[in-house]
Image: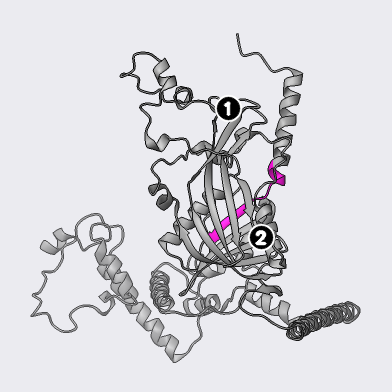
Amino acid sequence: MGRPSKTKNQKKARATAQHRSQEEYGNVPHSFVFHRGRIGKNIQQLIQDVRRVMEPYTATSLKAQKKNSLKDFVTIAGPLGVTHFLVFTKNTTSINFRLLRLPGGPTLTFRVIQYSLIKDVVSSLKRHRMHEQQFTHPPLLVLNNFGTEGMHIKVMATMFQNMFPSINVHKVSLNTIKRCVLVNYNPDTQTMEFRHYSLKVVPVGMSKGLKKLLQERFPNMNRLDDISELLVRDINLSESEAEQDGSHNITELPQACAGRGNMKAQQSAVRLTEIGPRMTLQLIKVEEGLGQGNVLYHSFIHKTEEEIQEALARKEEKLQLKAQRRQKQEADVAHKKTLKQAHRKKSLAGMKRKTEQAVGGDSDAEDPGMQEQQNVDEPSDDDVEYYRQEVGEEPDEDLFPQSTKRKRRLSQSTTPKKKCKYMHSVQGQSQERMGAKTTMKHKKASRPGQQRQPQRDTPQHRQGKKFSQQQRNTRQHRRPQNVKEKQPQAARQPRGKRQTGSRPLGSQRQGKSRLGQKQAFKGKSTFQKAGHSRKQKSA
């Protein structure tokens, strides 16, 4: 059978728990830890260690690029619920650490005097205690010596308290407290010590042998005859396991805690093991806003009340000037927009008036634009008419193909296109083809049996008529029509002994362009004139 489905109460309880966890996650503070500018490898590793301290409510895989500005981080921090920025910068003299509270500030600037990485702290310990389960819950914050007078001291204490989730002592579970962050302020040097510890609870009030039995690792009893010897005498115990607990770290547990022997209302000792990193910080200044407001406190520069008021007046004047410029810019934009709208209305009114005058005026008036378009659409008949006058017959349809092309649309532009070298070559080839076709039509028209229209009686026309009669007689003599039998042909004279003028005048090829000659020579087997076969030439 399949897995049984959950009951209605189980589903309701699960939904309630999810809603409660989402609310709790949204109410706790979140942080970004990143750097600005150029930093070294050690500072980059320090940033990773600080992210380790701020887990689990921080961005552990945040990548800050060079082109990103502080405004980019502020923009993305709102939807993600980020409340604090921890920014590291480095210059030629020192390392600076800025702590920003979103969205309205303040901004605290510290100087990092000394620091140690996690790997340095762990390597100096004989036995370190650090595992992944410790970082599933936020650390416990402990502030020391922050009760002294001073506005900047209270601001620092409030900022560090708001960086970590608040703890309700009546509802907190001791099993969730695995780490501790200690911030100690030294009023003499005006510096702070930042430390990070791992927390462990062990039972007290019993012998060392019994305590050894309760631990996870069972002691070695090869040299003992009875187990009572382990409880009575302290043997096989190293010096590092000697009792170091006292009144400073022994307390009574209000509830059962993880670990063997940690029972409710029993005495247990709280032990701390440092896991790093370490930092020694010195406060430089406190500012309003996100690093751009008034300086509320500066540790090196001290101003009188008059200087502060003068600086505030200068800043107020700059803000007023900026507001005036913004107001003037908005007024100029509105004025330009009004002029643009007025010009548009005036143009539309003029177009409407012009349309009304055209409709109410003479309807037979010519439109030059339409006339040009009609002239472009109609094909020119100059070539056709010239052919009729010169040849005396109607041209074929394929002789002037441009007259049969589709008419140009009215929407197409009539401006001539830019000529190029390729267009000149194409035009030259088309002119040669047109000349060849015209010559072939002339030959067709000069054949016998075809009627020709009367021409004008001029000397030029009479000479052309005489030449056409000679050409017709020559063709009849050279190419007899409808003759199937082979006709005897005179022996060909050698090329060098041929007399000038022995070839009839009409036998010369007239009007054949080079393009036609190339076409004739290209296909010898398919284009041969009657009466000029190879056998006749050999005879």
Given residues 84 and 223, the one toward you in this image is 223
- Which residue in the structure is indicated by mark 1? 262
The kind of residue tagged 2 is: Thr
Q: Is residue 522 left or right of residue 461?
A: left
Give the structural element (helix, strand or loop) at label 2: helix
- Residue visible at 32% across and 78% down in the picture: 470
Q: Earlier in the sequence, mark 2 or mark 1?
A: 2
> Residue beneath label 2, please?
75
User: Callout 1: 10 Å neighbours few (<14), some, many (20+)?
Assistant: many
Segment colored magenta: 25-34
For image coordinates 10% across by 62% down, the residue present is 538
- Image quadrant assignment for residue 366: bottom right
In the image, residue 104 lies at what x, y percent?
Answer: 73, 63
> How much space separates mark 2 and mark 1, taking CA atoms?
48 Å
- Residue at x-position 24% and y-position 66%: 521
Callout in the foreground (2, 1): 1
Report the front residue among 125 and 188.
188
Residue at 54 percent across and 41 percent down: it is: 135
Q: Secondary structure at mark 1?
A: loop
- Residue 367 falls inside the magenta stretch: no
Depth check: 416 or 538 in front? 416
453 with respect to 299 (left or right): left
Mark 2 Cα-neighbour bin, 10 Å: few <14, some 14–19, many ≥20: few
Judge whether 73 appears above or below 10 on screen.
below
Amino acid residing under circle 1: Asn
